[in-house]
């Protein structure tokens, strides 16, 4: 089954404790993105990747890191999480930014 | 910079009535435009997309959207609302560069 998977689905952590949210797709897509969803603000793109070893900032990259060492994986790293990063996070993939984005199920992160 | 504005964070319609969700965008180049739907506790799914082939775009579940360049709009409509249309809807644009920008979302409530 074609899908985007994210782990964990739920995470509660404390300020400053490094964490990684994994994302994997099995559709051989070139383009992958991370978004955060906050009430009233819609989805905001954090980082995106056009291909392996090619990543770029979205609209809200501060406090986040990503890597794309393999085509299928695109982990999101929070080196020192803060409470303002409490949000619902979605990973997505597509053939290109012009094509349909396939979204993962979401990761709900709470930073205390 | 590109941006997307969705007028109305909440819309309430009666079952069988017209659904109209408004989306205006700003872009310095011809855009790719998308509408996505998010059902409760799920990721986003593509409803339809505009790619310059035709100004009236038909999507899934009876939705359609019309691209109006002069008004920089891409409003979403459905002639007759169904209870299953209750969800949150997001307009998105890909213009210059490889970023995707989403609007703030419109939550649709369908009254019996």
Image (tube, coloured by chain):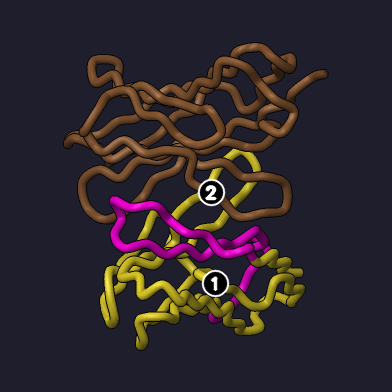
Chain colours: A yellow, B brown
* Residue that badge 1 annotates: A1
Name the residue rendered at 50%, 75% in the picture.
Answer: A76
Q: Secondary structure at mark 2?
A: strand
Left or right of A43 on screen, residue B10: right
Q: Nearer the viewer, mark 1 or mark 2?
A: 1
x and y percentages locating residue B29 in the rendered image? 17, 36
Residue most extreme to the left: B29
Q: Which residues are magenta?
A: A79-106
Q: Is residue B38 above or below residue B57?
A: below
x and y percentages locating residue B87 in the rendered image? 67, 37
Closest to the observer: B83 or A91? B83
Question: How many neighbours does mark 2 have within 10 angstroms: few (below 14), some (14-19), or many (20 or more)?
Answer: some
Which quadrant does the N terminus of chain B fall into?
Answer: top left
Question: How many neighbours does mark 1 have within 10 angstroms: few (below 14), some (14-19), or many (20 or more)?
Answer: few
Q: Quadrant of residue A109?
A: bottom right
Check residue B58 for magenta coloring: no
Would residue B70 be visible to someone looking at this image? yes
- Subunit of label 2: B
Q: Is residue A39 above or below residue B11?
A: below
Would residue B103 be visible to someone looking at this image? no
Q: Quadrant of residue A11?
A: bottom right
Name the residue rendered at 21%, 33% in the picture.
Answer: B53
* Residue that badge 2 annotates: B45
């Amino acid at each position: 089954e074609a899908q985007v998977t994210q782990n964990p689905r739920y995470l509660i952590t404390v300020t400053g404790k490094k964490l990684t949210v994994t994302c994997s797709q099995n559709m051989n897509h070139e383009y992958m993105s991370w978004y955060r969803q906050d009430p009233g603000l819609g989805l905001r793109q954090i980082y995106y990747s056009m291909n392996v070893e090619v990543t770029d900032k979205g609209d809200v990259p501060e406090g986040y890191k990503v890597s794309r060492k393999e085509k299928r994986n695109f982990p999101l790293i929070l080196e020192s999480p803060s409470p303002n990063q409490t949000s619902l996070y979605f990973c997505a993939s597509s053939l290109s930014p012009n094509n349909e984005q396939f979204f993962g199920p979401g990761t709900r992160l709470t930073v205390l | 910079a590109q941006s997307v504005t969705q007028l109305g964070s909440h819309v309430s319609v009666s079952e069988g009535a017209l659904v109209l969700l408004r989306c205006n965008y700003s872009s310095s180049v011809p855009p790719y435009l998308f509408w996505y739907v998010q059902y409760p506790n799920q990721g986003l799914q593509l409803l339809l997309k505009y790619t310059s082939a035709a100004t009236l775009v038909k999507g899934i579940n009876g939705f359609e959207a019309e691209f109006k360049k002069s008004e920089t709009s891409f409003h979403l409509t459905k002639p007759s609302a169904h209870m299953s249309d209750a969800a949150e809807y997001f307009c998105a644009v890909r213009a210059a560069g490889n970023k995707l920008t989403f609007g703030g979302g419109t939550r649709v409530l369908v009254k019996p």
